[in-house]
Amino acid sequence: MATTSPLTAAELPAATAVAAATGTAAAPAAWARALASGHDHLLARHDRGALVAVAWLRRAADEAEVLDLAVDPAQRRRGHGHALLLDAAAQVHAAGARRLLLEVRADNAAARALYAGAGLVQVGTRPGYHRDGADALLLAADLPLPRPLPRPPPAPPASP
Ligand SMILES: CC(C)(COP(=O)(O)OP(=O)(O)OC[C@H]1O[C@@H](n2cnc3c(N)ncnc32)[C@H](O)[C@@H]1OP(=O)(O)O)[C@@H](O)C(=O)NCCC(=O)NCCS
């Protein structure tokens, strides 16, 4: 079963390798500084003993921002990104955040679908924000995020 837990120093190389595979991630040294500071929320998701996803959030007063969220490319579309986002949101909510914010590239269809499915909505645009000219979208949601309802059990076979 997959679980989410605070990132440890021993996991930093694996975490930054997952983050680096996204191409947009912060440098490993930035992750190390954030972990050492103890100020930010750094979370790892594990499945069958392997680190499969990482998240980095920062809370200030009643707002929290997702600074990074990355799933190992070999582990995508298995629900890890969604589960980690919900767990991270629950953690910053428990720490006092009432609103979740993040920025996503307008051309990042996978991340936009993930965030929309988790209840985040667009609250702003930064045209041409990225070096290659791509727009950045600002997304937000009130906390807590809604947890999805469990899937209903399969219907019994129809009687003859
Ligand atoms: C975005 C990312 C975190 C999604 O992680 P993931 O574990 O694959 O996502 P999940 O399996 O939890 O998917 C949850 C939902 O997101 C959407 N989604 C995820 N990947 C998608 C894709 N490639 N295309 C379209 N929708 C996608 C779907 O709605 C999906 O639900 P479904 O599988 O029931 O259809 C992952 O693709 C990633 O690490 N990308 C690179 C880093 C990045 O862009 N991070 C976001 C920075 S803002």
Image (cartoon, grey):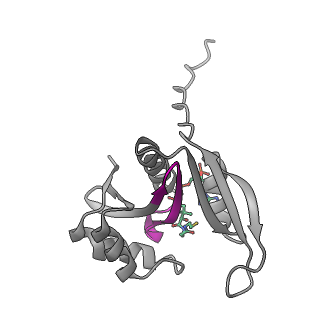
Foreground of the two, 116 or 66:
66
Q: Quadrant of residue 53?
A: bottom left
Q: Which of the 4 image quadrants contains residue 45?
A: bottom left
Residue extending farthest to the left is 10
Residue 147 is a magenta residue: no
x, y percent for residue 47 = 33, 55
Where is residue 1? Give x, y as percent: 32, 46
Q: Is residue 48 above or below residue 128?
A: above
Q: Residue furthest front?
A: 61
Query: Would residue 137 be found to the left or right of residue 71 on screen?
Result: right
Q: Main secondary structure of the magenta part?
A: strand
Q: Quadrant of ligand 1?
A: bottom right
x then y, percent, for residue 57: 46, 60
On screen, residue 69 versus residue 107, left or right, reads: left
Q: Which of these two is toward me, 143 or 134?
A: 143
Q: Quadrant of residue 7?
A: bottom left
The residue lying furthest to the bottom in this view is 131
Is residue 70 in the magenta section?
yes
x and y percentages locating residue 118 in the rendered image: 60, 47
Q: Nearer the viewer, residue 135 or 37?
A: 37
- Which residues fall within the magenta stretch? 58-76
The residue depicted at 61 percent of the width and 55 percent of the height is 114
Asked whether 158 or 160 is in front, the reply is 158
Residue at image location 71% in from the left, 66% down from the top? 137
Q: Horizontally, is 10 left or right of 124 in the view?
A: left
The quarter in which the C terminus is drawn is: top right
Counting every numbered tag in the picture gives 0
Please give the name of the residue rendered at 49% of the width and 77% of the height, measured from the top-left corner.
25
